[in-house]
Image: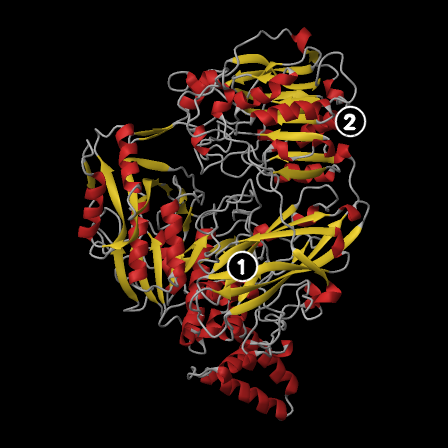
Amino acid sequence: LRYEFSTETVPREYIVRYAGYHGNEARACLLSDALAGLPCAWRAVRRDNPAAQHPSDFDLLRLAFNCTPALTAEATRRLLASDAVRSVTPQRRVTRTLHGFGPADEDVELPRWHSRRSFSHAPIVSGGLGAGVRPAPTQITSALQADVLWSVGFSGRGVRVSVFDTGLAAGHGHFKRGRVKERSNWTNEKTLDDGLGHGTFVAGVIASYRDCLGFAPDADLYIFRVFTNAQVSYTSWFLDAFNYAMLRRIHVINLSIGGPDFLDRPFVDKVWELTSNGVVLVSAIGNDGPLYGTLNNPADQMDVVGVGGIDFDDRVARFSSRGMTTWELPDGYGRLKPDIVTYGAGVRGSGLRETCRALSGTSVASPVVAGAVALLYSAVLHRGPVINPASIKQALLASARRLPDANMFEQGHGKLDLLRAYQLLRAYKPQASLSPSYIEFTDCPYMWPYCSQPMYFTGLPVVVNVTILNGMSVAGRIRGEPLWIDGQNGRLLTVSATHSELLWPWSGWLALQLGVAEAGADFDGVAEGWLNFTVETVGAGVGEETSTELSLPVRVRIAPRPPRSRRLLWDQFHSLRYPSGYFPRDNLRVKLDPLDWHGDHPHTNFRDLYGRLRSAGYFVEVAGRPLTCYNASNYGALLLVDTEEEFFPEEVAKLGRDVAAGLSVLVLADWYNTSVMRRVRFFDENTRQWWVPDTGGANVPALNDLLGQFGVALGDRVLDGEFRLGDRLVAFSSGCDIAKFPEDGRVLTAALADEGHQLMQAGGAKSRLEVRAPVLGFAHAGSQPVRPGTGRIAVLGDSNCADSAHQLADCYWLVAAMLHFATAARLPAFADGFQTWKSAGVPSSPLPMRMEGSRLRLHSRVLLPSAPDQIDAASPRRRHRPLPACPTPSPCRRVAAEAAEDLKRPAFRAASLALLPEDRVPLPPDRLSAESLESAIRNRQQTAAAPIDRAFRLFALSCTLLAAAGLLAFAASRCRRRLSRRARPGLAPGALVRSASAGIDQPLLFSGAARAGLQKGSGIF
């Protein structure tokens, strides 16, 4: 099932967050003191839910209709002036649209969600999976061998699990009597029951005890109904419910919801607070795959277990969202997500009418992991605070099985391995670990995109964003500064590192910047080294361990410096996206995905274009800073693709100089029309609120300011259709026309539909108005005649055909042809028939103006928040912030490997966790059966375990007697058949110890004195 999302803020309602928790009367006093004398009415909304009688850290403030924007701003200013107030943010409303599967389905389900936070379902065929996929097992618990842990007495008992969803009917027959401890309603409906079926399904995957089994049937379930039957929820409902979950001392929360709004600070901060209080949060990563850069929040947070989906052939599901995270753009690089993948296609779970049904989606994979976590938790409850959100996550990631054909942003650390996770968690020793535990730029496909392009001298530093998990304490820090140790050819690398000042909650980040020194300008080979540093606790820890020494091995591929004509600079700095503001879709015909939120990065929604450019021999570098920070003489072309940001005047001037010195510019633009922008604003019938875009598909006025010096300008027509170049068709989706071009430049004039005209007609007329307009152009920059050595300009009025999101047909071949002109001054053959701009006779037209009242300045890194909408010719600098300084990373302290003999050289592999000494020896591969694992668990348990099935033991004894009597062949055949039924899928020899032949070593379990093995997992960023 798929969903559409959008963000809708409720007018005149604000979440006022306090610095601490206060009772009702104290909060009322705080509001009254701050807003005394405000000349408009206001009130704190009464919340009728189980948390209402407990202290809270927020209020929902509703302003009256007579509160003008100026009075609203004054109320916000007064509140923020109070030391007791932490923030004031708009209340958000979540709306979703539900549809049924068809007559064969017993429950209503949800293929389309219209929200920022929605259930992560994927399309499935009624009754099961699509063709070509192995049929799902009858029980998901058997596929992951939960019954092995059940057989030795672990079933979730003592673990409190909450399901934030659509509720659950009282007395549902799939749950043991007394296991549903509490059902609570956080909505404005007077019911606790599930009218949709989603909450019932999720709860069943976690804790059903019959028919379609859940993982932890004896766990205590706490059902939080946070969505109405009308598919509505609010941020404030979640905040209250989260607070109540902490009061109930919940161990595990499942959130089969998500959305792209990682800037919803009340929600994000509350998630941090939950995990800091020891709650393990498991959340669906989203169903916007196979597109990259589509991760959902909160699953994209470092302290949350983000879950992706695979099918029962162990292939990453097409629907599962891919990384990287986009929080860090444009300054840095994203982190590894999802954390882990598990079965999420055709999984059977509980239905409303106490039957079983199959669903697909990461919304399904999330409760699979949440149920597994509850089961694991029950097996190690006796270990107390040693088991926490970090240690649980460390065990899950370190035990995961890597899938052979998927990269890190598809599978995270790999497939959930429940039994191996139990082995690690049972003997876990508090420690810090890294994700990834190594950086290997030659490890393809797993280390894509790092393995897709070598490093070289003068190339921009490559940024690797590593997550630090700290199982020793909720707060930690890095002691001193990291030390770089040169390995083989390590001296050829430049290395710098920045990191979180505070690792909280349970986690932090380490950003490693790698470059090539001048000594490696002509080097062709591999360079190695490792980063060494120590993580220590801040405050009380969970055990005796207070520090962990970590080593991050690094191996990169270095190539000789490519020629200038093969090097491209991708402008990322001028890309803006949701959730920082309302940046609309580039293709106006796509109604179901109204926001531009994928990052517009070569490794997210332009991933396929990046692959084609690499295959064509180009080297792509990503510029996350203003254009003034780069040496343009290193590059053949600058790529301006779907840019929404303004340009600094200094950038405009520098680009003029750079083009005169030989830099070419390739522009892939998009629509911009202020009338259309007003037309595509959102209107919510319930809140009566309009939401107007901050810019168009691209910021055409800003591009015109930049390109005007070359005689190029884009128009405000919104065009749609297709045109032919040679024997190929080019799809043109909501693009713009070229309004001005150098006289000798070559342009293609195409017959296209005026989409803007159609959108502006009352009711959206269906009649087609066709116009002829220039949309593709090639020109030599500079004055005529062209001075040798100057750059060239290639312009296409649309980027959709190069964007993997909502692409009708790709035009990678056209982009390659444009680049060939830009870097080699050769017009493509299909341009031979193009007219010059002078002969085309394009009538002049006014250039598009900036939108009056646009909120772009509030999200811009270039404009001042107080900037006027239009440029003041007398004082243009008044619009712009000061030009930021270019970054100059501080190099790490470094020593040669010979001088660091006391530091153990780490291995380039997925490192396991350090375990307690008495559990250092893993089971040998030839003993890895369900029975041997049961025996090993039983021998090490402190509490009594459930006995092995008596009938099975008698049968095994009879087989032995038969063999002794000379009937060896008969007995062996009978035993094999019965044992194959007894053994669980996937428990073949070597199943719990990774095969070195598969590229992953067996677990290295070290004593407390060993320095190695303290990093986690097989994954990255």
x, y percent for residue 8 = 35, 36
Q: Which of these two is toward me, 508 or 305?
A: 508
Query: SS at mark 1?
Result: strand
Asked which quadrant contains residue 234, the reply is top left
Q: Is residue 681 left or right of residue 627?
A: left
Classify 575 as above or below 276. Answer: above
Q: Are marks 1 and 2 in contact (CB under 8 Å)?
A: no
CA separation in Å, label 1 and label 2:
45 Å
Label 1 or label 2, whichever lies nearer to me, is 1
Please report whichever mark, 1 or 2, sits nearer to the chain's N-terminal start.
1
Classify 823 as above or below 521. Answer: above
Q: Amino acid at mark 2?
A: Ala
Quadrant holding the N terminus:
top left
Label 1, residues with CA under 10 Å away: few <14, some 14-19, many ≥20: many
Residue with the mark numbered 1: 468
Q: Amino acid at mark 1?
A: Ile
Query: SS at mark 2?
Result: helix
- Is residue 425 at all visible to an observer of this figure? yes
Q: Which mark is residue 637?
A: none
Q: Residue at x 43, y 18 (%)?
A: 675
Asked which quadrant contains residue 353, the reply is bottom left
Q: Which of these two is toward me, 63 or 885?
A: 885
x, y percent for residue 722 = 60, 22
Label 2, residues with CA under 10 Å away: few <14, some 14-19, many ≥20: some
- Is residue 139 at all visible to an observer of this figure? no
Residue with the mark numbered 2: 824
